[in-house]
Amino acid sequence: MSSWTARAGHTNKMGATVNEAGVNFCLFAHHAQHVYLCLYDHSGHSEVARIALFKGEAGLWHVQIDGIRKGQLYGYRVAGEFAPALGHLHNVNKFLVDPYSYALHGEYETSGRHQVMDEMGKMCPLDNAHLMPKSVVVEHTIYHGHRPNISWADTVLYECHVKGWSARHGEIEHDQRGTYSALGNEAFISHVKALGVTAVELMPVHEFISEPFLAPLQLSNYWGYNTLSFFAPHRAYSSSEQATGAINEFKAMVSSLHEHGVEVIIDVVYNHTCEGALHGPSCHFRGIDNASYYRLDKQGHYINDTGCGNTVAIEKPHVLRLVLDSLRYWYEVMGVDGFRFDLGAILGRDKHGFNARHAFFQCIAQDPVLSKAKLIAEPWDIGPGGYQLGGFSAPWREWNDQYRDVVRRFWRGDNDMLGVLAKRLHGSADIFKSRAPSSTINFVVSHDGYTLADLVSYEQKHNEANGEHNRDGHNANFSFNFGVEGVTSDPEVKSLRLKAQKNLLLSLLLSKGVPMLSAGCEMAHSQGGNNNAYCQDNAISWLSWNDVSTYHPLSLFISDLQRIRNAFSIFKYDQYVHDDDPRFDLGWYRPNGDPMQSGDWHDAKLHTLIHTIVDKHANKYVCLVLHRAQHEQVISLPKLEQPPFNQWHLLLSSDDTVNTHADNAQTHFETSEEITLTPCSSWVFSNVQWHQVTG
């Protein structure tokens, strides 16, 4: 390293900021007594300088180092009080990465050396620097790509794991499989475009590490909900070996997707960090200022509203600033279009519980950058009053687990589901009230739980591979297996399972609200009944591509559903329809074609729901028929009179014996004609024909 000099810096910007003279460093550590900047050589193995920072106001420490440039490797050591009962866990023996690390160099290695205290509760004297990655000084460039700016009403989400989607994809070069580059590849883009997807929702891409208890099990964190840095992109998803290669590759992926009209939303985890509970590793917050960065009780113990050992204290000004800076960085510099917030209720939690007017929400609402972003909440945590579905305010959207469970339970055959199913199909107005129907993110499966194929193949979870004796994962899955648990060669069961997946997809894509597909649902991806594959970075989780995957019956079925969704304006109409609506009429009918009466909604013998939607302006009718019983059902379609028509046309059915696109298909039915539904099937009829739908 060339000659350098240290002098007082400034506190205008946090982290490492490149300037004409060198680099300014600024760190928040309110309770620290001394802060040391450690500079490393290009290998990251040798410390070449240790410099004391200057203490400024409001807990900010700073130093300007003249003579160094971007690419410099560094980290911190912080000295202060070691008093666990007061929440202070300073230990100068621990090397700490900068919370504002935009890139990291070197690998994190699991070791007891990272702990701040030993088994006796005494300060651990062991140094851990050789086992920690080093922060990298980075110079930023703003993203200037064209953003698609798709409205919420037109949005279709595709939840996807960066590595898992392409790790086994034969059309992608080996060195690009499992990387950001693969998702900027034509193979990915053409696939999601064919599914009607407008936005990919990537599972965590922030730099993360594995939990210590997974190493002895020869497992590792796969999902990524164990964040090490809120700024640095995860390097394992990059094909580059350069420290900043992941940044450039991620931005290139975003640009490629944007050029093809696809938005990028990332799943972010600001509710907890990889440091876990007290005996977890000390990587940054714990050693810098444990009492300031985390929520603690009066005894200095972590408040664990996340279930992951710690909870980030976002209500504190400098922690709030850190999160907002991270969000702004990913939007402005990395180019993403929005965020899905893991355990989002945490972000609105104060000492009295969830607060829809929390400073975090107010800051985002008035921020000139972040107010443009798409915002999605997972609206719950495990703390008191933590379930907050419907509790967020516009412009937030929310994952709707009640939609998921009701649709699953209806198709499973549970009683007393018709009324609540109708509410979910119509955008869950009972939950979101005065907000728009696009407030609900509708989904049937996600990364967390069964895959779509496993939902109709397993009634018991099979998580033995996770090493927790099948104790982990959800127990209330509302799944059904058609009489056989798991894989079967029985053609009848296989046919029923394919139809069941189509039924679930039809319900999802022809509901009001924003639909979210989970990667793999279009090709019957199975995890062997594992409903908590967070630690399975292997063939259990990776999509199994083959020559016919792109043309899988489910993929083609989704494409057909998207054509129908696009053809009928009700599904994009971002208002709830009431009885006096000037444009739309909704109807709900019994199998005989008569309108549903109040007692019918709770009739345990009623297994068929007929739902009509009339667009009076466009003179278009659509009729959804959902038949969940395992027996045939004769129905009469409703005789609608305004405007009059004589025939219903069958557009689509989940029954694979009914090919609505074949020249000889029976797709036209007189309004007086009876129709026999096959067991466990769904149907879409209209007064317009298929060629009119597809244009």
Image (cartoon, grey):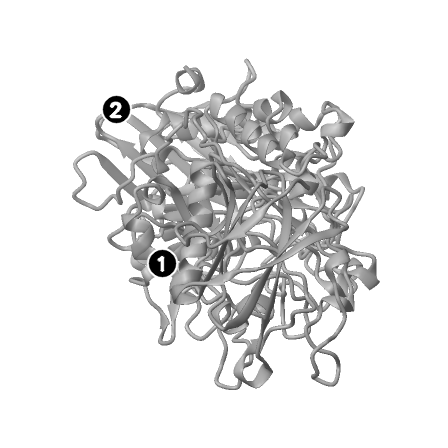
Please tell me which of labels 2 and 1 falls first in the chain: 1
For the residue pair 245 and 435, the one nearer the viewer reads as: 245
Name the mark on residue 360. 1
Distance from disc 2 to disc 1, alpha carbons, whole Å, reads 43 Å
**Residue 178 at x, y percent in the picture:** 70, 36
Q: Which quadrant is home to the C terminus?
A: top left
Q: Quadrant of the N terminus?
A: top right
Question: Dot 1, how many residues are within 10 Å of its Cα: few (below 14), some (14-19), or many (20+)?
Answer: many
Q: For the point 42% across and 49% down, which residue is it? A: 13
Amino acid beneath label 2: Ala
Q: Residue beneath label 2, please?
A: 618
Secondary element at tag 1: helix
Quarter where residue 118 is shown: bottom right
- Residue shown at 70%/61% (left/top)? 211
| Marks 2, 1: nearer the viewer | 1
Can the viewer see residue 656 in this picture?
A: no
Residue 678: which disc? none
Image location (x, y in percent) of residue 636: 40, 37
Q: Is residue 362 above or below residue 20?
A: below
Q: Amino acid at mark 1?
A: Phe
Residue positioned 70% across, 77% down in the render: 117
- Of residues 347 and 675, which is closer to you in this image? 347
Residue 3 in sight: yes
Count of numbered circles on the image: 2
Q: Quadrant of residue 286?
A: bottom right
Q: Is residue 497 above or below residue 683?
A: below
x, y (%) of residue 596?
32, 50
